Structure formats: structure tokens, C-alpha cells
Image (tube, helix red, strand yellow):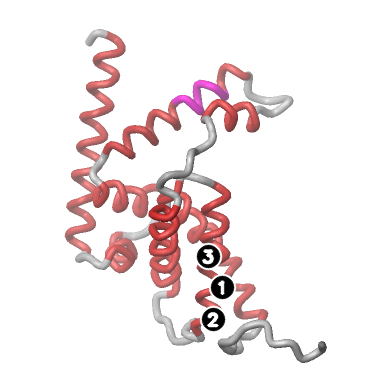
Amino acid sequence: MENAILAETPVPRVTAVDFDALVCAHARLVLNVAYSVLQNAEDAEDVAQETFFRAYRSGEVEKVERIRAWLARIAWRLALNRLRQRSGRLRRDAFEDVIGQMPAAGKSAEEILLSKEREILLAQLLRKLPRELRETFALLTVDGMTSAEAAEVLDISESSVRDRWARARKLLKEKLAALVGGAYGS
């Protein structure tokens, strides 16, 4: 069967060179946005692929003025949908991730474990933030978006983004101070 139909919906034509350039230019952003929501590399990669597939199928790529924010918004929504779907699924143990990342040479095992421990602590503190503050903080700091881009992704005003970011930073600082003060008796 040479003329088999693979999809019911025709896929609009976008030149491969243009789309390859688009993927190369924005893959890291899309992956970071997905990872900031999902906290799982495999799921984030799946969402990144789905984001570019949907962008390709939409036929809107050449019409979009702010492509970075548009792609981030697609990734954000897909990641939130995936998060809702997997809510009952167990995550791998953090210790397994540390062991898998240990290089044969370079940093010592103790340095790697301490670094990973700090990452885990920060991730735990971020998870304790209210959802709207956590999302805004992730987009601005982890994904490196501007407040205008984050506002477009979250569908809120730019001033709301800046306000949420300031509140998130303040809460994280307070939680970290309380944690460090409690750990060291200050």
C-alpha cells in the first residue's frame, strides 16, 4: 500500500529548513518550560516533541509574531495536562537519579551528593509555594523568560507577573531562612 493515509487531518506544509531552525532555536526553552512543570525529564521530552508537532500542524508558525512566547504557552498547557493525567503515578527515587549522574572522574561523590541535595531542597521549597507563584517563578528564573513573555504564557498582566515573582522570591527567602535557622539553631 504505497498511498496509505497516515492521518485524517492533512498536515500543512512548512519548509523543513524553517521548521528545523525553529526547533533548534527554541528547543531548550520548550524543554525547560515542560520540565519546570513536570519535574521529570522523560515527560518533559515528550511534551517538547508534542509542542513542536502541534506547532507544525497548526500552520500558524509563519503568522505568529512572538514565537518564543507562543511555543512556551503551548508547552506550558501540554505540561499541565500531562501533570493532571499522571497525578497518581509514582516518581523515581531521587537517590537513583544521583547515582545515575555520578561521573567516573571530576567532582567527588560527596560534592555531587551535596549539590543534588541542594537541588532537591530548592525543588521541595518551590513545590510548597502556591501554584501561581511557583509557575511564575519557574518561567522567569528557570526558563529565563521576560515578564512580558511570562505574562503571555500565563494569560495575566505583566505587572501581575512581576508582583507574583516578588512574592515568590520573598516566600522562598523566608522559608530558606527558617530552614537554615532551624538547622543551625540561629
Number of other residues with Cα within 10 Å of mark 2, as a class: few under 14, some 14 to 19, many 20 or more: some
Label 3 secondary element: helix
Name the image quarter holding the C terminus: top left
Task: Please give the range of residues in magenta.
Answer: 112-117
- Give the mark nearest the N terminus, 3 or 2: 3
* Residues at discs 3 and 1 in contact (Cβ within 8 Å): no
* Residues at discs 2 and 1 in contact (Cβ within 8 Å): yes
Q: Which residue is mark 2?
A: 57
- Residue in view at x 32 percent, y 33 percent: 125
Number of other residues with Cα within 10 Å of mark 1, as a class: few under 14, some 14 to 19, many 20 or more: few
- The percent position of residue 16, horizontal first and vertical second, equals 67, 81
- The percent position of residue 31, horizontal first and vertical second, equals 52, 56
Q: Look at the picture and state if 170 lies above or below 161.
A: above
Q: Main secondary structure of the magenta part?
A: helix
Q: Which residue is mark 1?
A: 53
Residue 17: name its quadrant.
bottom right
Mark-to-mark CA distance, 3 and 1: 13 Å
The amino acid at mark 1 is Phe
Q: Look at the picture and state if 52 lies above or below 88.
A: below
